[in-house]
Image: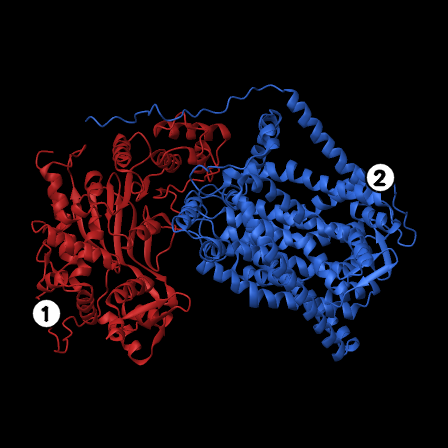
Chain colours: A red, B blue
Amino acid sequence: MAQPSVTLTAPEPQKPPVIAELRNVTKSFVVAGGSEMKVLDQIDLAVHEGELLALLGQSGSGKSTILRCLTGLTEPTIGRVLCYGQPLDGINPHASIVFQTFALYPWLTVEQNVAVGLMSKHMSRSDRDAAVEKAIELIGLSNYHAAYPREISGGMRQRVGIARALVSAPEILCLDEAFSALDVLTAENLRHEMISLWHKKDTSLKSIFMVTHNIEEAVEMATRICILFPRPGRLGLVLENHLPYPRDSKSPEFQNLVRTIHETITTLTLPDLPPEPTPVAGVPISRARNRMESIPYVPVGQILGLLSILRDTPDLTNIYDISNEIGKEFGETIGIVKAAEILALVDTPKNDVQLTELGQRFLSEDRIGRRQIFNDQIHNLRIFHIIIEYLKLQDEVEADQILKDIASALPYDNPEKILQTMVAWGRYAGIMDFNANTRTVFVLKDEDEEHS
Amino acid sequence: MPLPAFWVMNPDLPQFTAAEHRGRFGWLDVVILAGLFGLLWSVLHFGGGMLTHFDEHAMPPLETGVWHIPYYAGRTLLRMWLAFCCSLTFTFAVGYAAAKSRVARAIILPAIDVLQSVPVLGFLSATVTGFMALFPGSLLGVECASIFAIFTGQVWNMTFGFYHSMVTIPSDLQEAATTFGLSRWQRFSTLEVPSSMHSLLWNSMMSFGGGWFFVAQSEAISVMNKNIKLPGLGSYMAGAVERGDNSGAFWAVVAMLLVIVASDQFVWRPLIAWADKFKMELTEASQAPQSWVYDLLRGAYVFEWLAIHLLHPVTERLRVLTQRFVPAGPRKSTHGFSLSKLVFILLGTALVLWVGFHAVTGLIAAFESVRNAVSLEMLAKIAWLGVLTMLRVLAMTVLATLIWTPIGVWIASKPGVARIAQPLAQIAASFPVNMTFPIVVGLFVAWRIPMNWGSIFLIAMGTQWYLLFNVIAGAMAIPNDLKDAARTYGLRGWALWRTLILPAIFPFWVTGACTAAGGAWNASIVAEWATWGDTTLKADGLGAFIADVTQRGDTPLIICSIAMMSFFVVATNQLLWRRLYSLAERRFRLD
């Protein structure tokens, strides 16, 4: 391990054998209004023997769906899942899952919960008890046999989840955001234990396949990192990570790798486009962005918060620093920045985020002025014209009608969430409101006109 | 390379070790064993009475002595539990089918919806003749009819509740069961029943409470001009009233109350306390339900002994046996042809066809007999009587709401009172007030109260309690911060009621009022037509009409009037209660 070995993917000739893989997998779900939403698009992903593979992606990118395909919980719409070269039929017998929510049965004790992992095996009572005892021992749960899940802490609960997954001696352990419901210290501790467990090789466990949205977590644990990009989910960058364990998150190699991932995500999510002409009052708005573009599911308050932070701390420009400052996951931060960007309130050259002229003006305006700017910017977004056109003709329009139109315009998005976001933005801009009882979007009466 | 410390034991964490079992029998175990054998003996003893010879023309008269009451109480209780066992079996079978199969669901859910609206008591005439034909010369036929009446009174909401909790099992728990390859039975016993346990028990308790009404009514029935009395508390009470035996009637009421309270204390409370561990939340409940019987039973060793020496060997043997038939490892996906699937589908189709055939031919026969025997004017009259009864049910609901809402809210504001009042209201709702109707009717006669108005009171006697304890529960569930906020802003009087109390208790009120109104339709059959000695008081209403035609055995009119009542119930459910439910769900949810 002489040279810091961080290499961008290059198909190596002699990789260890594959245990399970997805071949050209596409998955669609039926969403509101009966239209299909494509979640995964032509995924090729293999879990090799002896590796600790991390699948990194924002929430909603379809990474959990990949995990469910690999373990046999769902079947792909198109494509194949193979395990040791054989097409998977039903549940993958070589894999086991640790759930984000632990998924423990509250009415069973720790011991009984772990024993659930062996229920499908034909074993005598004594063999089973011995296996359960071994798993409990291995994961540090001795003394907790007779406790019920509600009596123990979150970290201990997840240990039960891990013991239950390991008791059936799987070859692949799948971690579905297994640490994200835990506090920072507990999660860190468990991560180390998972690495040592995988390292020790004294169990049947060969590989770990983990799904996470936490970049540091992936870099800390994985030997290979795949980044999944959303809408529809497709694999972007694949990175080999040969840093020696235990990994020091302060080391320059570690930081380098984290930065590489940040930059990749940033450039792919916030591409540098030629600057748009700022709209001038009275001049008809040219639709600079011609294709229908999705909007991030971000509430208005967070966009305003981002703008204020940018104004108050002029030194803060790097998007990664902003993410740390506001204490949000990088993926979420990207979403907020992107929302501000499509409203032309910020610009994102490279990894920086800067207030635009319009953004500056927006901040200096009072409530009515801000609303006006927001209103103008919304009219620049083509997706909003779905609703605006309806509202020109009639005072109110059924949500289902709009959902159908959104679904056909943005086949990779969740139409319900898009509509929610649009209504939230539209409310702030003072152009529309939503009646939850009748499920209709309606024109907002302009208060200012009433006043004058 | 060195890795961080594996796991540091936190000294603050409680040490969990398996509960120390004494491994020795104590006096408590002796008492419990005696109790178990006593239970077995009584089931056999009272059960033996069900199989005696029965001749409808030479019925032995019921004993009149007060000391016979315990025996009659035992017979009534056994009937209740047999009916409950049937209901539970039906619930598991049908609720499971509805949750698992799309086809079954499409048939079962609408069927339950209609069936729970059918007034059970109107059917007694048909079921009694049917079951008597099934067991000629044995009392078992009449017993079955009574048990069937109780069963139909309690089964529907249990089934629906079980179905509902089956389909709302959190998906992560389901996925865990799937990945670990649990078989159908393992899934059922480790996931599906436990996660439904809480709602299943509460629904069972409510249904069981509602069952007393039907048991009391079905023990003394007059159908087809025959007067049939089954040995039981309800029939003893009816006999005592006929004889004018006041002390007998009094002791029968006391016995009834005792039996209800005993069922509550010895069965339902312990079960509820035990089922607390089946709650879904992973947080420790601040106030776990208490039961002294449960605490007592937990201290006994006999159950543990039975589990080790009886249950475990048997389950182990069963497991070894079944292993021969089930392949090891996770189940394969069931695409394509599989023999068991085909057999299952064929059996299911056969069952549906059989039930469907009988339902259709029955309907055609019923329609034929009605068409020939019932004129259009008669039909109009029945509809008009239905309107009258509906007004009565409505009046009962409104009056009970006006009276019990303020009282319920007041009770809820005094925790000490609420702790006593809530179980009392539940017992009052369970008590079969129809047993006491003759006495009340006597008062009506004495005070010259017209039955058309008096029957509203009779209906309310049994059903108002559902409103009361739901309002209490609702008012107690108002979060403290909302109450504090109201106090901070000086909300008082009507403003407080309008902004906080009424919206907060509205969902609970809907549940209570819907249950009360549903019960009221059934109650109207016995409340609009009552006898006191030689006087028979009769109100104008569909309930009295059904009671009348049932007694005369006029089949076409029975069919017609029951269908009319079912129609009214279904219509009010659809037009009123369902809308109120969804309104409550949308606007007044507290979370």
Q: Position of residue B276 (x, y in %)?
A: 52, 38
Asked whether residue B474 appears in the rendered view, the answer is yes
**Residue B255 in the figure: left or right of residue B209:** right
Hey, what amino acid is under mark 1? Answer: Thr
Front residue of this view, candidates A188 and B491:
B491
Front residue of this view, candidates B549 and B519:
B519
Q: What crowding class fits label 1: few (fewer than 14 Cα within 10 Å), some (14-19), or many (20 or more)?
A: few
Mark identifier at residue B66: 2
Residue A429: quadrant of the picture: bottom left
Q: Position of residue B421 (x, y in %)?
A: 60, 43
Asked whether residue B338 appears in the rendered view, the answer is no
Pointer 1 indicates a residue of which chain? Answer: A
Callout 2–callout 1 Cβ contact below 8 Å = no
- Where does the C terminus of chain A fall, quadrant-wise? bottom left
Q: Mark 2 or 1, which is nearer the eye?
A: 2
Front residue of this view, candidates B22 and A46:
B22
Q: What crowding class fits label 2: few (fewer than 14 Cα within 10 Å), some (14-19), or many (20 or more)?
A: some
**Residue B302 in the figure: left or right of residue A158:** right
Residue for point 51% across, 53% down: B505
Task: Find disc 1 in the rendering and name its residue.
Answer: A278
Residue for point 18% across, 49% down: A238
Q: Residue furthest right?
A: B58
**Residue B279 in the figure: left or right of residue B68:** left
Helix, strand or loop at mark 2:
helix
Residue B120: quadrant of the picture: bottom right
Hey, what amino acid is under mark 2? Answer: Val
Q: Position of residue B496 (x, y in %)?
A: 46, 54
In this rendering, the answer to whether A11 lies above or below B111 is above
In this rendering, the answer to whether A368 lies above or below B509 is below
